[in-house]
Amino acid sequence: MIGRGGLRHHTPRLKRRAALALLLGSTLLLAACSDAQENGQNPFNAEGPAAEKINDLFIPVIVVAGVVAVLVLGAVLLIAFRFRYREGKNENPKQIHGSTPLEIGWTIAPAVLLAVIAVPTIITIFDLAEAPAGENVLEVEVVGKQWWWEFNYREQPQVRSTVVTANELVIPTGEPVRLQLTACSDSLPGECNVIHSFWVPELAGKLDVVPGRDNATTIEADHPGTYLGQCAEYCGLSHANMRFRVIAKAPAEFAQWVREQQRGPAVPFQEGPEGEEEPAGPAQDLVINTYQCTNCHTFDQSDVVSYGPNLTHLASRTTFASGYYELTRDNLVDWVLDAPSLIPMESKVCREVGTPAVDNDCVGMPSFTKDTPEGEPVMTRDQAEQIADYLLALR
Amino acid sequence: MTTVTDVLEVPARRVGVLRRPKATTGFWSWFTTVDHKKIAIMYATTALAFFVIGGVEALLLRVQLYGANGTLLTASQYNELFTMHGTTMVFLMGMPLAVAFGNYLIPLMIGARDVAFPRLNAFGYWGFLMGGIFLYSSFLLGGSAPNGGWFGYTPLTSTGLDRGFLPGHGPDFWVVGLVMLGIASTTGAINFIVTIINMRAPGMTLMRMPVFVWMMFVVAFLTLFAMPIVTAALIMVYFDRNFATNFFVAANGGEPLLYQHLFWLFGHPEVYILILPGMGIVSEILPVFSRKPLFGYAVVVFSGIAIGFMGWGVWVHHMFATGLGPVAISAFALSTMIIAVPTGVKIFNWLATTWRGALRLTTPMLFALGFIAMFTLGGLSGVLHSIVPADTQQTDTYFVVAHFHYVLFGGLVFGLFGGFYYWFPKLYARKLDERLGKLNFWTIMIGFNLTFFPMHFVGLLGMPRRTYRYDSGLGWEGMNQIETIGSFVIAFSVLIFFVNVFYSKTRGEAVGPDPWDGRTLEWTIPSPPPEYNFEEIPEVESIDDFWHRKYTEDEQGRLVRLPSGGAVAVEERTGDGHGDGHGEGHGEGHGIHMPSPSYFPLVVAIGLPIMGYAAVFQMWWLAAVGALPVLYGSYAWAIEPQTEPET
């Protein structure tokens, strides 16, 4: 169901692989994991400095924990076999009420072990909390919405005019990217969404998107590729579907991508002089007038935020619907007709309320074939195909 | 030491109050009983029913996740079920089942004839039952069951109904239901505390109390202090939802994280509220079946107390990904590491208890050993959470699900099962069947590990929690299949347990009052215990007093049975050793005055859900209706005569 064509093959580092093998003691599970090496959501497959630092810290600790587990479990088994009740042999064991030296010993030993672990832990906490230095760090505002992600590249040296996109965060490789996480969007002034959590396991640990808090995190990808992400804080009905991906491109390609995003719409949206604009064609007429898609989406300006994803350059993405569906014509037609059947959304009343920002009972995209309010048209497949073709031309 | 049995003068009948019921047997007596043992049985029965319901919910979740993109459940059904599974297992199974054990055993173990507040005890049970029924009625009445997760984070749950992020009344039911359950468990906690402080038998000093009583003592304090915190948080959620207050509305200056701080300031002690009873049970079982005293009694007790205190200082480890800044995060990473120390001490002391013992591997002992092993795994994965950078990868993944199931299932539930097998003969003078018991143990051990061990790995491989579907090709499918199969093995095992209970209640091996060669006071009285528990209040001279009446030690410290020890004395005291349970059979039992049954705990409790519905649907006239039984019941409770005068 999901497009995975963009995923590259990883070359797992020997060290990690050995540690992972140690971690995955049972052969059964080892077998299950060997094919997991190539997924795009595996924290052990670190592809950026943050994720690598985490693994360098975690893997030795997990080995220690594994050793302790084996020792304790071994002791339980040993005791159960060795000290079984045997009639006439051991039924009256020596009564040992305690031993202060022993008890002090096994209070101090774990404390020392934990103290040893605490040092690199705290060093890494502070290390990862540091914002990247340098003047030219790319900053992207990440907005968690229900149930998709908006990425807002504001004006800065690398991006001279604002670019707004959705569900695919494009970054340059080899340099840190600072992400400002917010749940309060410019598209709904004075409104904030629920808590989400931004997580790209192969690049970094997760950080929550909390209304009213200026959380910021840094990601960096060592190599070009696609890295899967997922909202990691329960955020309501379609939390499970709130995915996204980070697409890392070589710096030159990234600059090229920025330039392309900053162009106007590939297909004219409206015609006519200022003030009395007309749809430029039948598909645009459907989008503007018949089905009022423009209440929530933007089709002709890549630098504005809207209630729904900005679609000005939709066709430059590989997926849509919070990164859940591959961007194909068939998928798009199905989606335009009846989106809630593909991703559950609380959008039954969305066509009634007009501008959804006013009413949170409408969350997501309505079906244009079901629950149609009186007086509104029901979308035909032919119309949906027209719209899909138009969208796929928006490069 | 005064007890409830010191009968005061019977006051004259008062007008306007129902006659005080007298029956202590028969169906209707269950509705008016104030006997801690009957109330314990009601707690256990109800909590086990909720255990089954929560278990069925878990099975549905597991079937949904058997393969990628499962279609058994819709997203909203899945969200309701995982919310109710968590809520049920914590508030309607774990806590009340521990209270059931405490209710039955605390008076017996400290040599008391009842708890301090018998009617409050009954009210605690009825409040729990009403709260549970109220929560589950949301499936029918609420348009949606609670669906904000058992943690109910704001602003997801707190945003008003008119513009809510969660459609339906589910979160309202959740908020009000938990407040109700909080009232019930708070009364229970107060009762336990007062009972343990005031009603111990002569000579039962605090440091001679059985470890289980100690742990319940700590748990009662944790409950007493934790419940008000979550109640405040829940009421804020209710006000935000229904009266447009802005406690958690960031856009209006509120703070969503305030809720998380409050919830986990309750929620982490809650974890210890759930696990300490299990630790207490295991600390009773291990010495008995090792024929050795608990290794380092004082250290085990103080470790429990230390855990109880430190439990208040680790809550932020549930919030490591919320962005609190490196200083706060580091502090809580350290506190999380430190709390592992007393926990580790307990494990080592348990192991030392069994070391060089004479281990009878009966079912209770198997569960106790299983507890040590499984809880150790859960404890270790818990320490891993203190490695904060790693926790930012693992939090909200199945790794955490694995972790807390090892603690709460491998810990608490194994402990409770062990407790059932251990104390069942005290209730019914019959043992639970050992063959079925061993089958029960081994199947649950296998099923549990099949279900939850692979969750460590899917979590480490990036599978998030609370998601109703996942994609294929991420390396998660095989392990999810194993997990689902494992969950049905657990279900089979639980079924065996119930079969065992029903079979053994009438046909199990009949045993005397002390079938396991026990160490604590409950084994000195007949099985089942008479209503008044102890004909004579025992005098206690040491820890494991009963044991020391039966055994002594030779010069090498080896166990020596006393030629005519306490065991004989028990036989004498209990006649045939099977005790028929009620005073009439024994002249001695006559004249011991027990508190009379009462209607009013139930009457008061019935008002709670009525007021709850009023709060959910904002029907204020209904609140007045609900207040009637509460007010009338409380009034009558206060002035009803001590006992119905003999006529």
Image (cartoon, rainbow, N blue to C red):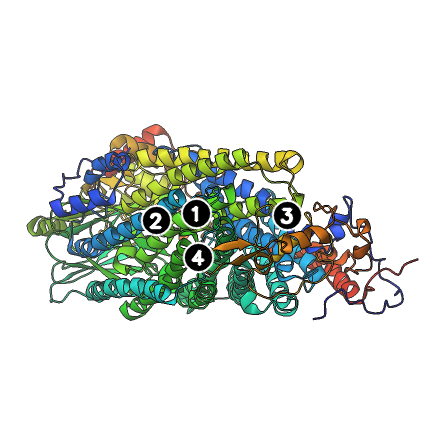
The image shows residue B33, relative to residue B224, as above or below, that is above
Q: Chain of mark 4?
A: B
Residues under numbered marks 2 and 4 in contact, where contact means CB atoms less than 8 Å apart:
no
Residue B426 marker: 3
Q: Which residue in the rendered view is the most extreme toward the left?
A: A252
Residue bearing mark 4:
B153
The percent position of residue A265, horizontal first and vertical second, equals 19, 46
Give the letter of the chain under mark 2. A
Asked if badges 1 and 3 are on one and the same chain, I answer: yes
What kind of element bears circle 1?
A: helix
Q: Quadrant of the N terminus of chain A?
A: top left
- CA distance separating discs 2 and 4: 41 Å
Q: Is residue B465 left or right of residue B421?
A: left
Q: Residue at x 38, y 61 (%)?
A: B345
| Amino acid type indicated by mark 4 | Tyr
What's the mark number on residue A75?
2
Foreground: B297 or A45? B297
Comparing B52 with B646, the one in front is B646
Residues at discs 2 and 4 both on one chain: no
Chain letter of disc 1?
A: B
Say whether residue A313 is left or right of residue B396.
left
Which kind of residue does numbered mark 2 sit on? Ala
Q: Please name the amino acid that badge 3 sits on.
A: Lys
The residue most toward the right is: B647
Instruction: Give residue A162's position: percent from left, percent from top.
Output: 20, 57
Q: Are marks 3 and 4 in contact (CB under 8 Å)?
A: no
Could you give the CA–CA distance between mark 1 and mark 2, rounded to whole angstroms? 11 Å
* 3D distance between C-alphas at marks 2 and 3: 32 Å
Residue pointed to by mark 1: B369
